[in-house]
Amino acid sequence: MHEWSLAEAVVNSLLSFARKEGVSSFREVELTFGEVMELNRDIFRTAFEELSRGTPLEGARLVIREEPALFRCNSCGHTWDFDEAHKMLSHELGILEEPSGDRESPLHFLPDLARALLKCPSCGSRDFELVSGKNLRVSRVVISE
């Protein structure tokens, strides 16, 4: 459950910001996470709420947005998305979806494994970039007045 450690890092970062800037409370926090993280929003939201109790973040509205993953081959220029990457992983590694339809790839825990596990679906090169969809960032905060 990396959601708890990610929520803790976000809360600690925002509390540090609050101390430095003299913020007494937050009304809204918007986060953007990369699709490759396969973040469980419910678990993250619960962790954020629990870790925010008794702090300037308590009661803040949490908005969570997903940034789609996009891969680009440095050899041929082909681009592909996370669905295509997941199909490759499922085929190469025999990863199956849960009966509920949920999927969890090795990239969920270690996004940096993409280099070792994936290759360009067009030319087969392993020289590619994960252009977007791997980070977690605070996109916006609204401070209560």
Image: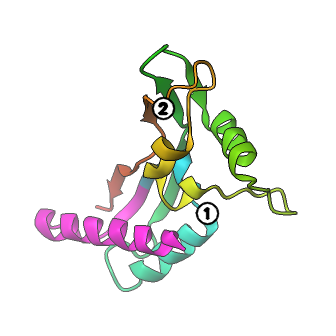
Q: Where is residue 24 in the image (x, y as percent from the top left)?
A: 24, 71
Residue 32 seen by the camera:
no
Task: From the viewer's perspective, tell me whether residue 74 is left or right of residue 20.
Answer: right
The residues colored magenta run 1-29
* 135 lies above or below 145: above
Residue 11: give its label. none
Question: Which quadrant holds the C terminus?
Answer: bottom left
Residue 26, position as x, y percentages in the image: 34, 64
Find the distance from the CA under tag 2 to the CA under tag 1: 29 Å
Left or right, 80 with respect to 95, comes to left
Tell me which numbered mark, 2 or 1, is placed earlier along the sequence.
Answer: 1
| Of residues 143 and 120, the one drawn nearer to the viewer in this rendering | 120
Amino acid type for the residue under numbered disc 2: Arg
Amino acid at dot 1: Asn
| Residue at position x 61%, y 63% in the image | 40
* Residue 143 vs residue 104, the one in the foreground: 104
C-beta proximity under 8 Å, tags 2 and 1: no
Image quadrant assignment for residue 55: bottom left
- The number of discs equals 2
Residue that numbered label 1 is attached to: 40
127 displayed left or right of 107: left
- Of circles 2 and 1, which is in front? 2
Q: Residue 126 carries which label?
A: 2
Most frequent secondary structure within the magenta stretch? helix
- Residue at 63% from the left image edge and 25% from the top image edge: 121
Kindly indicate the quadrant of the structure image that contains residue 89: top right
Considering only vertical position in the picture, is 35 above or below 132? below
Split into 4 quadrants, where in the image is the N terminus?
bottom right
- Residue 20 highlighted magenta (yes or no): yes
